[in-house]
Image (tube, rainbow, N blue to C red):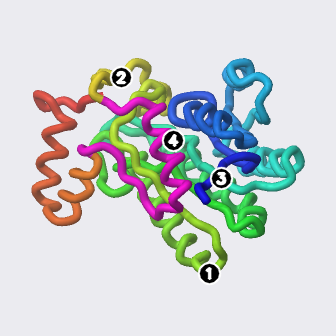
Amino acid sequence: MPYSYKDKVIAITGGTDGIGKALVGALLKRGAKIATCGRNHDKLYDVQVQNSNKFLHTVVADVSKEEDCKKFITSTVETFGGIDILINNAGISMRALVKDTDIATLKKVMDINFWGTVYCTKFALDEIIKRKGTIVGVSSIAGYRGLPGRSGYSASKHAVNGWLEALRTELLDTGVNVMWVCPGFTASNIRNMALNEEALPQGESTMDEGKMMTAAECAEHIVKAIEKRKRTLVLTFTGKQTVFMNKFFPKWADKLVRNHFFKNGELVK
């Protein structure tokens, strides 16, 4: 029988923008019961309005805070009776050279991207094991290849990939699937919210979104990968090319990545 999302309980962090918001919409259409969280109450309300008359539960939560993650997972279980799938999507990026970057920037990125994944997964783990469900980490190509100007982001996504790989191996005999997804450049709000060297949002990105995969396309790929219980998902031709080059031709990849992210000696933000 084909996989069905009907009545599956899915917890999605960071569901108010970009890929997370697209996942909420795509999975609600498939009959799932969705719980999502975000830091902004007004944005969560907008998501509820856009998906009225659906099984949608929202919680104001900052995934960098352990207690907020516990509140989100506990509230989801109390509302829907359990959790089948956890999608650790909430994330933040950064744009600054290491020599210019405050430690606060690096710490904030790690707290949200890595520790947010750890907290939510730990609190949801028993429920997911009970249902032989799925744990997903929305990572990045930066989880395979360190990117200049994005050192903290790269570190956090390497940490996510390694942690989920260890968890997957531990859970091999439980029926739980653990998967990490690595989008290439995706048109979403994460770049505009990226932190500068002082841990403040940088504002508008100079990157051309016209050539990027949309958040909706990315969400559809993730939904299908969950159905197939994949181990990893690397998206876009550039993303696959980057992972391949870095694995087999790392010195060449250094030069290609450097040329991509620096124009006239200046970091592209």
Q: CA distance from mark 1 to mark 4?
A: 40 Å
Q: Name the residue carrying label 4.
A: 104
Q: Nearer the viewer, residue 170 or 195?
A: 170
Q: Residue at 13%, 62% (x, y): give it.
A: 249
The mark closer to the camera, 3 or 2, is 3
Identity of the residue furthest to the right in this view: 78
- Where residue 130 appears, x then y in whole percent? 77, 68
Q: Amino acid at mark 1?
A: Asp
Number of other residues with Cα within 10 Å of mark 4, as a class: few under 14, some 14 to 19, many 20 or more: few
134 left or right, relative to 185: right
Q: Amino acid at mark 2?
A: Ser
205 left or right, relative to 177: left
Disc 2, SS: loop
Q: Residue at 10%, 55% (x, y): give it.
A: 252
- Where residue 215 appears, x then y in whole percent? 46, 32
Q: Name the residue carrying label 1.
A: 173
Disc 4, SS: helix
Q: Name the residue carrying label 2.
A: 205
Given contact means CB atoms under 8 Å apart, are the residues at marks 1 and 2 in contact? no
Observer able to see residue 198: no
Which numbered disc, 3 or 2, marks the residue that appears first in the sequence? 3
204 left or right, relative to 58: left
Which numbered disc, 4 or 3, marks the residue that appears first in the sequence? 3
Q: Amino acid at mark 4?
A: Ala
Identity of the residue furthest to the bottom in this view: 173
Numbered range of the magenta stretch: 212-238
